[in-house]
Structures are given as structure tokens and as C-alpha cells.
Amino acid sequence: MTAPLPFLPFSRPTIDEATIAAVGDVLRSGWLTNGGPKAAAFEAELSSYFGGRPVRVFNSGTCTMEIALRIAGIGPGDEVITTPISWVATANVILEVGATPVFADIDPVTRNIDLDKLEAAITPRTRAIIPVYLAGLPVDMDRLYAIAGKNKLRVVEDAAQAFGSTWKGRRIGSFGDFASFSFQVNKNLTTGEGGCLVMNTPDEAVLAEKFRLQGVTRSGVDGIDVDVLGGKYNMTDIAAAIGLGQMKTIDAVNAHRRRLAEHYFECFGNQFEAQTGAQLPLAAFDTSNWHLFQIILPDSGPTTRADFMTRLKQQHQVGTGFHYAAIHLFSLYRELGFHEGMFPESERIGRLTVTLPMFYAMTEADVERVVAAVKAVLAK
Ligand SMILES: *Cc1c(COP(=O)(O)O)cnc(C)c1O
């Protein structure tokens, strides 16, 4: 009898020993948060990574998008267009600022918002769009900004998954309007929890700092004023120390993920889609950071998605996820009038998408193991 292989999760962070030591230094320093040296250093490194644009760090990628909408002055009466296939945070932030979410269906090949449908959804009340770069794959950025420019719309890029992704050789976040990144634990670069916002002007950065910490502005020795309603969204120096450590390895992390993705394609082979009816992701090796490797199961395959996920876990010790369920079908959104049939591509992919393991500590042998398990479960 052979022992079962160890469980392979779909994602696992890698924090190196130098970073763990740096966190220890922060804990010993006595300065854990509020304008600490690590958060400032992390912001400076991120700014240079994004071509010198202003960057501020926060305690999540969710608040980062909400703050971008607030800086842009989006509120009640305004419509914001986004995709149904994202983490629910993307649409929730539109509701948080009192604006109206409008969805446009996805392109079934890229699984990102379909820019034709986005354009068709624009009304005189549309003020902003939130594209999502699912799995780290950007949309057509030239077309996105042409649409935004023509219609005078602000763009809040939900680049939560796209740290290190590129468009025509330029990093996502180094150009465009607002770009929001998440450092949640599954992301290519993590601080445990956290996020950053890339902005256009120093004035926007000042406003971001106010929204980040109760609207406070300090001056002189004991001067303090509050002139906007802010929240409590600042990043700790503990988290920033993790981020600074992760900045040193992010290029190697993304290169390794790309090699793993290439190996997935090699192992699945040219016949996999025809033989199983499943769909592989777009082979976007010029642009994606390969945050996720997702397959779409066949609509009427030998298993349901739940059965597929259960068998991978129980019979093959392979963990999977689903990113994401269609947002407009959640109860909160149904109460706003959304229902089945409105966004058929999103609904199909929301039901059938499966995220396979993809993380820095994975090996090519792990990829081979996952592919063999997927093929075994999908075989009739
Ligand atoms: C992770 C993620 C978020 C939210 O980021 P948090 O840091 O968890 O708040 C939003 N959108 C997408 C697409 C994400 O993947």
C-alpha cells in the first residue's frame, strides 16, 4: 500500500526567513503602526515599481477601491459599471459609497468584462467603471481607456490579482487612472491582509490619507483638524515589513508561476478540451501574472462541480477553489432587482469555474499530479 500524497492546497503563501526576521525587528522596535517607517518605505518602493506614481497603502484591497470611488466623488445617483465575475467586494464598494452598481457580462474566453457590453451599458448617469483583471489577465487596456476618455468616466482598476501583470510591456498600475491592488494572503504579493492604491496626483494622495485615518490632518506640534469623513484603514508596520520582504521576490514569484502555467498547458495537451469539453484559460503569457489557473468544466460532464471538487480532494488530495460565483445572483443583489438570465456567460462560468493549485512553492511534479487527477475525474 502506498501512503497518500500530502494535501496540495490551491494557494499557499511563501514568507522567507529574512522577512520573518524583519517582522521580528518591527515587533521589537516598539513602533507597530500609525505613520511608521516600514509603511512609508513600502509606499516608496511601490511608487517606484509603478513608475513614480503616488501610492498609499491600506489594510485591504476592498477599502482601497472604496476610497478611490470617494476620491473621485462617486456617490448617490451615480452609476458604476463592473463585472459579475469577481470577488463580491468589487460590487459592494459601489453600494458602500451609495452609488448604483451596473453589471456588464463577461467575454467567455478572457472571463473579464466584455468591453462591447460595458460600452452598451453606459448611460448619462454613468460616472465610473471598475474593470477586474481576473486571474491577473488585464482587459484590452487601450480600448478600456478609449471608452473611458470618450465618455469622461473615471476608472478604478480592480487590479487586486494583477500585481506584476503587464500590457504591451508596461506594468498594470504604472499608467491609467486609479489602480487598486490587494495583498490578501492568496495574492502573488501578500502582507497577510492589505492593499495599495496607485493615484494620479499628490492632491489625490492627500485625500487618500484622510480617508484612510478618520479624515485627520495634523499640523505643527498639536494642530489637528477633520474635514472629511474617513475610516480606519491604515496598514500596520508589521504588514508593511512583510510587503517589503515580498517586493524582493515578486519577480521570481511571477516568473515561477508563469513556468507552472506553461507546464499546465503542456500536461493538459492539445486534446484535453476536445476530449472533455472543459475549457483552459487564455494562454496569455505576454500579460498575465498567472495569479490563478482556472478551468471551466463542461456544462453536462460526468460530474457536477461539487462532485469534481470533492473527488479531487478525497481521492487525489488536491485542493481547488471557485473564483467566482456571479455577484448579481447573491441575495443582496437579487433584492436590488438582479436575477437569473441577465448575464448568461457570467452565470455559466460562475457555476462551472474551478481554480487549480498555483503558488510559488509548487513544483512541476505537483502540476503533473494535478493534471493527472483532473483527467482521471473527468474521464467517463
Ligand atoms: C482579493 C480581491 C479583492 C479584495 O481584496 P481584499 O484585500 O481581500 O480586500 C477584490 N477584488 C478581487 C478581484 C480580489 O481578488
Image (cartoon, rainbow, N blue to C red):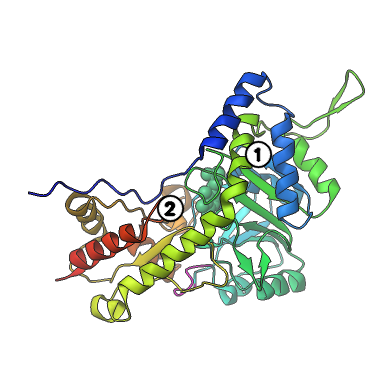
SS of the residue at dot 2?
loop
Which residue is labeled 2 in the image? 359
- 237 with respect to 292 (left or right): right
Front-most of residues 361 and 36: 361
* Residue that badge 1 annotates: 58
Mark 1 residue type: Phe
Residue 69 seen in the current view = no
Q: From the top left corner, tell me how far across and down residue 76 is, in percent.
A: 68, 49
Q: Is residue 76 left or right of residue 307?
A: right
Instruction: Let me know if residue 334 is in the magenta part.
Output: no
Residue at 44 percent across and 59 percent down: it is: 292
Label 2 packing within 10 angstroms: few (<14), some (14-19), many (20+): many
Q: Residue at x 23, y 55 (%)?
A: 312
Q: How packed is label 1: few (under 14 Cα within 10 Å), some, or many (20 or more)?
A: many
Residue 211 vs residue 190, the one in the foreground: 190
For the point 63% across and 26% down, the residue is: 26
Q: Which residues are magenta?
A: 107-112
Horizontal and vertical percent position of residue 287: 57, 69
Residue 65 location, x and y as percent?
Answer: 64, 49
93 sits left or right of 348 in the view: right
